[in-house]
Amino acid sequence: MRSSIVTCAIRGRCYMRESVRAIALFALVAIGAQSAPSLALDPQAADQVTRGYYLAIAGDCAACHTAPGGKPFAGGLPIETPFGTLLSANITPDRQAGIGAWSDDDFVRSVQQGIAPGGMHLYPAMPYPAFTHVTREDLLAVRAYLSTLDAVSDPVATNRLPFPFKIRASMIVWNALNFSPGEFHADANRSAQWNRGAYLVNGLGHCGTCHTPKNLLGGDKSAAPLSGAAVVGWYAPPLDSSVRTGLGAWRIEDVVSYLKTGWGGGQAATGTMALVVANSTSQLADADLRSIAVYLKDIAAPAQAPAPLDKTSAVMRSGKALYSANCSACHTSTGEGVAGLAPTLANSPIVQSASTDTLLDVVLNGAQAVATDAAPTAPGMPAFGWQLSDEQIAALLTYVRNDWGNAGSAVAASDVHSIRAHHAD
Amino acid sequence: MSRRLPATDVAIIGLGWTGAIMAEQLTKAGLNVIAIERGPWRNTSTDFPTTYIQDELRYAIRLDMFQQASQGTLTFRNNAHQTALPIRHFGSFLPGNGVGGAGVHWNGQTWRFLQSDFVLKSHLEARYGKGCIPSDVTIQDWGVTFEELEPYYDKFEKLCGISGKAGHLKGQIQPGGNPFEGSRSDEYPTPPMRQPYAPTLFAETAAAMGYHPFARPSANLSTAYTNPLGVRLGPCTYCGFCERFGCGNYSKASPQTTVLPVLMRRRNFTAMTNCEVVRISMSRDGKRATGVSYVDSSGEVWEQPAELVLVCSYSYNCVHMLLVSGIGKPYDPVSGKGVVGRNYAYQTSCGVNMFFDDKVFNPFIGAGSLGMCMDDFNGDNFDHSGLGFIGGAGISASVSGGRPIQHRPVPPGTPRWGAAWKSATRDNYQRAMSIGSQGSSYSNRGAYLDLDPTYKDPLGRPLLRMTFDFHPNDIKMSAYILERMAQIGAKLNPKLLIKEPLTPPYNIVPYQSTHNTGGALMGADPSTSVVNRYLQSWDVPNVFVMGAAVFPQNAGYNPTGTVGALTYWSADAIINRYLRDPGPLLHA
């Protein structure tokens, strides 16, 4: 099992239904509106709250801290992990159930170091290994914003893990092995834009929570940041500059567009990334998105140059016929797709990815693009799992991964079977 | 007892084309809007997926997405001397059900009516004299002109991304388009579709005969398109599964592919699905609607108070809603008095089928609106002097799809099943084409809608009763059109040419057209119309009626383009006139 507590925290969000997601989003917007009246007294405090609201979006706090149909930031969202279930905490200003009684130092320490008042260790489902990079000033702005929320007095018993994982002190050991605390320090040799991007990507954005490969304990493999990671049932692709499987072929504008609208580089944000775009990145300032893009585009990638498979093989010919019958109407016979509706398959990082988990998930279960103000269509791809056999899907994807300039390993029927079995669980 | 809900600004009955457009316009204007839809929610990728939407048996034969008679039907008779009986299986027309309404499973033929169509009575009397209209034909002017509607036609076409070629642009006749259309302010948003063999052959022949063929304006898009709301549509794949099917490729304009993605993100909009409005609730004095009463899927009745009620369900269902709610005076065919239910009209169709030895048509390359048309014999585009009828028809060669169950062209005399039928199918599937016509249907005194005295729907309301037959004027018109088509067909040198005339009496069983019009007609005079030129009820000013029910008579075109234009026209009047001073926009 290569999954981790951290990555499963994100996977837990996938079980939310569409309607629930919409409610969560609306709740977030509503909070933004409600925070306005309390700003009137002190302009400096008002600025801080406004900034905190924005930073809370950058950190996508509501994604975990608002439960389906629940009150904003009142916690209670079940987060499935391989070790058991956690519930997200109530971070409203209630003095008993929430964090209203915490001092600023308590708040900063818990977010940056994963240690709550009284020395209670948090689990890294709360991504403090990333948030440790966030400046105290920014965290206090987030806190100022959270202080304007309605206090919710419903307590949440966050820890539902079985023994021995329920012993929070076990995190002392985990931290010693996997956690490097410390605020972000700008690299003087880089531009301000690059540094802003690095700060957002590695700090509040906590992109590595999904996109950085994990060790056996679920800690980041620090030698390969953002180089792509398997999560349970899908694969978070590399954000490095690999031309085939990363962002190497994307322009800065493509990355910005992807994060802003849900579409960029011919690709659509779906699944978990659709939620990230909807709840977080689509609401960020263009300058910040550009900084993120500049930083991501600068991440080096290992050289890879696999050769495409022989097109004349029986599997490739069978795959082509299946593609023609099932896929070409939308994705076109050249794999070009239709901008804004059907992603480009030719030269697609997801299609050529080393792990086929996401690809298989999409073909088996379908996918729904995200709706944003800039791109409200949110087209969906139907599920093919009920219609095509493991062998057919394997041939189809082997073909897709090896035509139009694509190159990727063959997909085996057993790969299809295992992803199918995972989703049936 | 019904439970009372918090009041809203606008209650919309039915979330199809007109309901969705109205909701978009009014929520944008800042109003709180609740749309109440009898059928289910429907979404492209989950309800019309490319993986099974081509199930012809399920959708086209068993009519999966349509209104089922068990939900509510109507009774039918040809004339007032007969006893109407309930339609137990829809046939002649197929009303929609569910979010998107018939806009989900339409063909996508998107027309503008002719300038003369909107001033029909005065135009004909001016051209041919007062006596040209048969005494029992009750056609009238619309109260709105083509020129007034033009910007709203443009708006609807841009919403949908209609594919076509202007024939009359800013006063100039354009090659390749329809020279008979009224002057357009702009070109079509996307280029015309590519035409397959049969329509091309028809067009070449028609042009050689001096007619003016052009590609039919189509909501099956020729290219990808992003509409002014930011919603994206894809290029049509010519798969031939449009009519009776949802489009899985985002290529056919529908509420789902044009409006709903934006509308559903508006916080001041709510859609209540699987909820059926029982009636419009009225104030004690009957002068004002107070909201709507609806029943949910568990049978519970809710009262939804609203300042404004928009009747946006299917054409004749709007008439039914007015009748059961007591809005407007019901039409009495004996005295000719009253208006609600008056001037029900339909569509008058005939065609020719042709069989060839030396041609291969590939009819499976199709789309709902794919085809070449000519308007030389539509409306009053030709001189009717001495012809003995008024009206006309659009003539076209269309390829809507060579679907395996419904598209089985065989010569007359072929057995209807068995080896000989199979053999004839094999021989003729690739070698048959047809020329069709869609003719005007001119309202008359004996064609109307009222409440049935006997039969009731599941909610205990009287069923709507339809009384209709083809009028002699329309039959004559159709016979004339048939000969024009036969002349063109003969020039193609088919092995066999079969005329398919209009055959009275009107039969409710075989499918003909879901273009039911009238009954809540618009006009300038409250004694002959139900709504004014802004589609506002003359009697209850906070009720507006959308859709083809407001047509005073039907033209030789599909109604949706005009329905869309009228909806935008009415929305404009509501936002810019009614909201400033709620009350009658016009005084009789």
Image: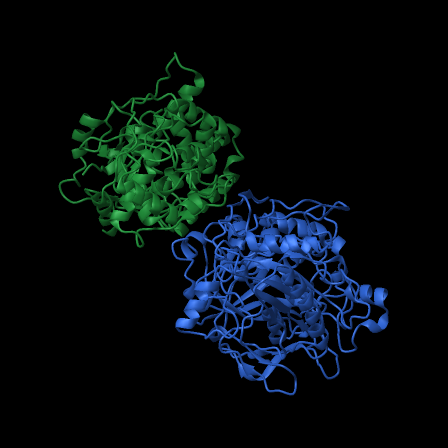
- What residue is rendered at 34% in x and 29% in y? A244
Indicate how the structure is coloured in the image: by chain
Q: Measured from the top left, where is residue B374 in percent x and y?
A: 67, 57
Chain B: give its colour: blue
Is there any visible trace of residue B298 in the rendered image? no
Q: Quadrant of the C terminus of chain B?
A: bottom right
- Could you say which is closer to the camera, residue B330 or residue A396? A396
> Could you tell whether A329 is left or right of A349 in the image?
right
- Could you say which is closer to the camera, residue B325 or residue A388? A388
In the displayed structure, B541 sits above or below A161; it is: below
Quadrant housing residue B396: bottom right
Q: Measured from the top left, where is residue A379 in percent x and y?
A: 45, 46
Is there any visible trace of residue A304 in the rendered image? yes
Q: Residue furthest left?
A: A164
- Could you say which is closer to the camera, residue B194 or residue B527? B194
Q: Say which chain is green.
A: A
- Could you say which is closer to the camera, residue B99 or residue B368? B368
> Could you tell whether A227 is left or right of B183 in the image?
left
In the displayed structure, A405 sits above or below B421; it is: above
Quadrant housing residue A192: top left
> Could you tell whether A128 is left or right of B547 in the image?
left
Q: Residue furthest top?
A: A189
Q: Measured from the top left, where is residue B554 in percent x and y?
A: 68, 66
